[in-house]
Structures are given as C-alpha cells and as structure tokens.
Image (spheres, rainbow, N blue to C red):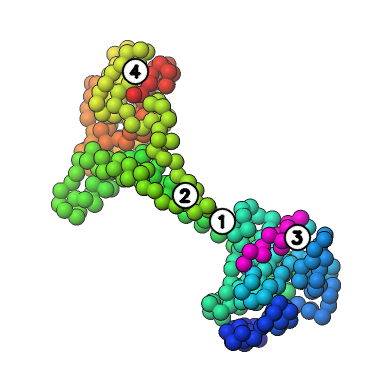
Amino acid sequence: MPLQSDIEDIRSKLKAGGYQNEAAVSQGIILRLLHTLGWPIFDSSHVTPEYKLGTGRVDFALCHPPGKPTILIESKDVGSAYGSEKQLFEYAFHQGIPMAILTDGQEWSFFLPGEQGNYHERCVYKLDIIARATDECCVVFDRYLKYAEVISGKAIANAKKDYKDVSKQRQIEAALPQAWTQLINEQDEILVELIADKVETLCGFKPEPDVVRRYLDSLLQTSSTRQSPVPTSTVVQPRRSQIIQGAENSDHFTGFVLRGTSYNEGAAIRVLFRVFEILAQRDPAFFERYAALPTHGRTRRYVALNKMELYPGRPDLCEQYSQKKFGNWWIGTNYSRSTIRHAIELACEVSGLRFGQDLKLI
C-alpha cells in the first residue's frame, strides 16, 4: 500500500534525523502524505500554501470547495510543535474552520476548534508515527485526512464522533471518584450488603451493617484529610465539611426537633422509627396514606404490609432486615442514612409538616 510505504519510509528518515527544518517537514512529509491521500497538491485552490488569515498565515489550507478552507495545517520543526496550538486555534476558530492540524512531521495533533474545552480537550487524536503501528497511522490519516473523506464531509463527521466519544470517556473518568465518594457518604444499603457479603466470603463471618458503615465513615475521613495535588483537568471533589451544610441537609444525624421539642435517639434508624411513631399517634391513618404514595425509593417501599416489598428481589434482606412495628406494618432496618432522610421527608409531606422547618434532623 502506498500510504503504508510512505509512513514506513518517513519513520526511518525521522529516526535518522533526515528532516532538518520546517520546510523539509512541509515538503518531505506533509505534502508527500497529502499526495498519497488523494489531495491535488499542485492545485493551489485545493491545497493552498501560506494561507493568509487576518494578519497571520498558516502553512497549508486544505480547501473544499476550492478556495474555502476546511482544514488548516501548521508545520513546525521536528520536536518543536509543543505549545504552538494557540495561534493555530485563533486562526481556525475565528474563521469557523472545522479542523486544525498541528504537526512537526512526527507528531500529528488533530483538533476541532469549535468544540468545548481547552486546547488539550479539543484534541481528537494525537498520533506519533514513530511510536504507533503503521496500520494505526494509516487508519488515522484515512479517517481524518483522506481527500475523498474530506470532500464528502465524512472526515469531519468522523472527527466529531470521535471527539464525543473522547469527551464522554473523559467525563466518566472525572465523575468516577465523585460517584465513589457519594456512594460511601450515602452508605446505600446495597453497597453495605455487598461489602458484608464479601467479608463473609473471605473470613466466614458476616459483619453487622453498623460495622460496615463505620468502616465507610473511616474511608471518608481518610480521604478528606489526605493532601494530594489535583490536576487542573480533574473535577475537584467537595470535602466532607462542604457536603454537610446544616443538620437538615446532612446524612449524619442521631435525633430531630419537632416543632421545638428535641428527640435524641442515638442512631438514624431509631430516628425514623420515632418519627413514624409520633406521626402515627397524631394521625391514625398516617401509615395508610404513607403506603399509598406512588413511590418511596427508586424500587423499594419504606413501609409495607408485605415485607417482601421492602427490598424487591432480595428475599434474604427482607427476612434479615425488616421489623413488624406499629401494628401490621413492616419497616426495613438496613437503610442508609440518606434513604432514612428521604423516608422522613416523605413522612413530613404526608403529615403536612415542613421538612427542615417544622421537623429538623440533628
């Protein structure tokens, strides 16, 4: 294949120091590859050298239709491309040119100036033709720079699709630590149960939920005191003190205040039981109206006449972590603090209380 042969020959010459300056890179690498990729390099209406943009120039403008730039290419001496993105971006962005390429012959950075993020984040692909396999180099050049692909619009579409994939992956990677921190902070009962099951598998003894929760608390405390540099591209996670802003917004509570009267129950689950008890004493129909709510949790019910509704799909949890209280009503006992808080918010809604005002968690 001509492209494969060109890349292998260029690679050998790069290793031997065969391109001494920017002009050599432009003529011996850029124009050579463009020619192999189908560009009419001798037609300046399609491949325009020293293309003028405002008060500056770029080394090449690839045009389609003739005279209308679709891709800008800026050439640098081998090893000198780093830090040259700003000027190229300004040219491409202000002129609405979809793609910009910065290369020193060895490294090729393909940018979409019109997308979001800093220069680095708008780089769809960075190709080092010495470090990467020849087949991979061929795929990248064909995908983004082949003449037929560019004039059909497919090359830009390919780049935008790849940018979205890269951006999606970057967002996922940035959100993973936050997701883990929130899971630990919320101490969802499914997470607690999974950890307890794994401990039992490893040592033969299953810890109580409170033991697991204390361990998760210790992870949060360790994380909040650890000092480490954070890359500028990383989403900074809030410290525990930022997450907890006021008792009514906190998942860490052991009591509550109901219209001026304080109750210290010592544990979140006992707070839930006590709130339910008081509200049921005030309103005999409280549990019927609470159970009639269309939704409680995402899949579970907080109060039910049938205990199997408390942990759907987990009969083991239904048997182990449920209590029959207040007559014939079943209530779960293995709820995370955030789940308990939500259950109490619903109780206030049913009883006509303003959560955070008439009833505050402490």
- Locate the N terminus and report the quarter of the image it occupies: bottom right
Query: What is the spatial separation of the Cα atoms under label 1 and label 4, in whole angstroms?
Result: 46 Å
Q: Give the number of the disc on residue 91.
A: 3
List the residue tagged with mark 2: 175
Asked if the stretch drawn in magenta spans residue 330, the answer is no
Report how far apart the C-alphas of labels 4 and 3 lie in the structure. Answer: 62 Å
Q: Residues within 10 Å of mark 1 (few under 14, many from 20)?
A: some
* Amino acid type indicated by mark 4: Val
Q: Give the percent coordinates (x, y) of residue 132.
A: 54, 77
Mark 3 residue type: Tyr
Q: Quadrant of residue 342?
A: top left
Q: For numbered disc 2, what is the local secondary structure?
A: helix
Q: Relative to residue 343, is residue 55 depicted above or below?
A: below
Q: Badge 4, how many Cα within 10 Å: few under 14, some, many 20+?
A: some
State which region is magenta.
82-94
Vertical relation: 190 (above or below) 331:
below
Label 1 and label 3: CA atoms lie apart by: 23 Å
Answer with left or right where residue 362 lies relative to residue 196: right
- Residue type at mark 1? Ser
**Circle 4: element type:** strand
Q: Is residue 89 magenta?
A: yes
- Relative side of 261 to 57, left or right: left
Q: Which residue is mark 1?
A: 167
Q: Could you tell which of marks 1 and 3 lies nearer the N-terminus?
A: 3
